[in-house]
Amino acid sequence: MLEYVTDAADPRLADYTRLRDVELRKSLEAERGLFLAEGEKVIRRAIAAGHPVRSVLTTRRWLEPLADALGDALVYVVSDETMSGIAGFPVHRGALASMARLPLPPVEAVLAPGPRRDVVPEGPAGPADAEPVAQPARRILVLEDLVDHGNVGAIFRCAAALGVDGIILSPRCADPLYRRAVKVSMGAVFSIPYARMDNWFTGLDRIREAGFRTLALTPDQSVTSLDEVKMTDRVALLLGSEGDGLSSRWLAEADEAVCIPMSSRAMQAGVDSLNVVAAAAIACHGLMRSGARS
């Protein structure tokens, strides 16, 4: 259903206003149970993941490319100028969708076995008619207090691209469904299971009880290199906040501390660490070296 809107202050567009105001948006989105997807690819991935469409805000140019994915969704069509006035910035990908959030699963659901359609059973059945095969999560990330939405989105993209099975967030981590996180992840937040701890103090206990060996990533070069650590069947890699890294509590509770080897020349020049996204990408690659599924 199409509705043409010319006024950026039209109350029908309330879901899309003041997108630069992070604190307002966080409270508004929690209150209304929504999140925003930006751009055709991300909107399609959100729909494919089962998120109901509340409405779509787009320009005439982007209406046709999205039409087949939107069905009978309510679509507000505006000019480029009106779009920028509503969002507060140029929307280069031409479309925003207000999507309904789905209930977040408990931590145990991410750690437990689940159906995977990328695993085809042996026998005559081909990929088209093969039943999902239940396999347990073997490689997961655990994020402690990452507060930058862009960093969280980028880590989700790294984890999804490299085959990590799931992500667990500490209670204070940024929301993966905040607009910037979704945008930076290019929709990867919809392709990898994740859950949020309800208790930071006992969070690692629940992960270990599920059979995971916990590895704490640290810039400390005196600990075991990630290249050399022994990977068991189930491994959880802990990543800390942007500034301080992992808390002393989680470092002490982890089964083993690990590091990404740094160049000695760089260390002498004062470059002693990587930013958290670069570290996550390298660490995910190392984590999957003995746990990847084809």
Image (cartoon, helix red, strand yellow):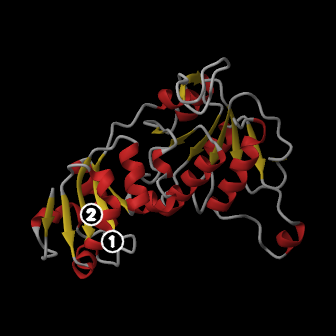
Total numbered badges shown on the rendered structure: 2
- Residue 46 position within the rendered picture, expressed as x and y whole percent measured from the top left: 38, 49
Q: Up-down: is 53 above or below 114?
A: below
Indicate left or right for 60 with 255 as reference: left
Residue drawn where x is 49% and y is 62% of the image:
184
Tell me the tag on residue 128.
Answer: none
- Residue 135 position within the rendered picture, expressed as x and y whole percent measured from the top left: 60, 24
Residue 247 seen in the figure: no
- Residue 76 position within the rendered picture, expressed as x and y whole percent measured from the top left: 19, 64
Q: Which residue is mark 2?
A: 24
Indicate left or right for 246 with 28 as reference: right
- Residue 33 position within the rendered picture, expressed as x and y whole percent measured from the top left: 25, 47
Q: Which residue is mark 1?
A: 20
Indicate left or right for 290 with 5 as reference: right
What separation in Å lies between label 2 and label 1 (alpha carbons)? 9 Å
Element type at mark 2: helix
Element type at mark 1: loop
Task: Name the one closer to the observer, 175 or 117.
Answer: 117
Q: Up-down: is 187 above or below 253?
A: below
Residue drawn where x is 89% and y is 72% of the image:
265
Q: In the image, what residue type sits under mark 1? A: Arg
Q: Up-down: is 117 above or below 78?
A: above
Residue 108 seen in the figure: yes
Label 2 CA crowd tier, 10 Å (few <14, some 14–19, many 20+): few
Residue drawn where x is 32% and y is 53% of the image:
68
Q: In the image, what residue type sits under mark 2? A: Leu
Quadrant housing the N terminus: bottom left
Residue drawn where x is 46% and y is 37% of the image:
197
